C-alpha cells in the first residue's frame, strides 16, 4: 500500500512452533546457514535474549539487529519514517486510515478482535492452540483482504 517494496523486503516464517525456538525462518536475508529458527534472529540481535519470539520483526540489515517487533510501532515506522523511500509518498496510511474509519465502530471492534488473534497465535503454549489460533487469524486476514480489494485502507491505527 505504501510502495516500499524496493526499500523493505518481507520474509514469511513457517507456521510451526519448535519447542523452544519459535517460528522457522524460510527464505530470508537475515537467515544464514546456522540461523534456521526465528529465535536465532533474536539472539543475533541480543545474545542474552530470553523472552518470547514474535512477529512481525523489523530487521536492520546494515546494523544486523532488530529495530522493533511491536506491530503498531512497525506500522507507524513504515508509514512515517520510511515515507521518503516510498514510491507513492502522497499516501499517508495512518492519517487516511483514521479519517476513513472515524465512524466505523464495528470495523474497529473487528480489528481489535483480529489483533487479539495474532497474540493468541504468538503466545500459544501448544501446537494445537497455535494451529487453532492461526486458522482464525487467516480467516480474518482473508476477510480483510476482501474488504481491501477495492480500497486502499479501511481502519484507524489508534
Image (cartoon, grey):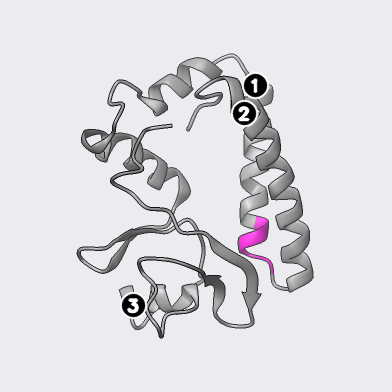
> Distance from label 2 to label 3 (Cα)?
36 Å
Q: Secondary structure beneath disc 3? A: helix
Q: Quadrant of residue 109?
A: top right
Quadrant in which the N terminus appears:
top left
Relative height, residue 119 to residue 100 (above, below): below
Q: Main secondary structure of the magenta part?
A: helix
Relative height, residue 97 to residue 10 (above, below): above
Instruction: Count up the numbered dots.
Output: 3
Residue at image mark 1: 105
Rate crowding at label 2 as few (under 14), some (14 to 19) or many (20 or more) other CA atoms within 10 Å.
Answer: some
Relative image position of residue 135 (x, y in whole percent): 75, 53
Please give the name of the residue rendered at 59% of the width and 20% of the height, measured from the top-left corner: 150
Please give the name of the residue rendered at 25% of the width and 40% of the height, measured from the top-left corner: 81
> Distance from label 1 to label 3 (Cα)?
41 Å
Upstream in sequence: badge 2 or badge 3: 3
Q: Secondary structure beneath disc 1? A: helix
Please give the name of the residue rendered at 59% of the width and 27% of the height, measured from the top-left corner: 148
Upstream in sequence: badge 1 or badge 3: 3
Q: Contact (CB < 8 A) between labels 1 and 2?
A: yes
Queried whether the magenta region covers residue 21, the answer comes back as no
Relative height, residue 130 to residue 134 (above, below): below
Residue at image mark 2: 108
Which span is picked out in magenta? 120-124
Residue at image mark 3: 44
Relative height, residue 3 to residue 53 (above, below): above
Relative image position of residue 125 (x, y in whole percent): 69, 72
Amino acid at each position: 500500500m505504501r510502495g516500499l517494496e524496493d526499500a523493505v523486503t518481507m520474509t514469511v516464517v513457517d507456521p510451526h512452533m519448535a519447542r523452544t525456538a519459535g517460528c522457522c525462518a524460510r527464505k530470508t536475508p537475515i537467515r544464514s546457514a546456522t540461523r534456521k529458527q526465528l529465535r536465532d534472529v533474536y539472539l543475533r540481535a541480543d545474545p542474552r535474549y530470553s523472552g518470547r519470539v514474535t512477529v512481525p520483526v523489523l530487521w536492520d540489515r546494515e546494523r544486523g539487529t532488530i529495530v522493533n517487533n511491536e506491530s503498531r510501532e512497525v506500522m507507524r515506522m513504515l508509514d512515517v519514517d520510511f515515507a521518503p523511500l516510498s514510491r507513492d509518498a502522497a499516501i499517508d496510511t495512518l492519517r487516511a486510515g483514521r479519517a476513513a474509519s472515524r465512524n466505523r465502530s464495528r470495523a474497529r471492534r473487528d480489528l481489535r478482535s483480529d489483533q487479539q488473534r495474532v497474540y493468541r497465535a504468538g503466545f500459544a503454549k501448544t501446537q494445537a492452540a497455535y494451529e487453532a489460533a492461526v486458522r482464525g487469524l487467516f480467516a480474518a486476514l482473508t476477510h480483510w483482504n476482501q474488504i481491501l480489494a477495492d480500497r486502499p485502507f479501511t481502519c484507524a491505527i489508534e
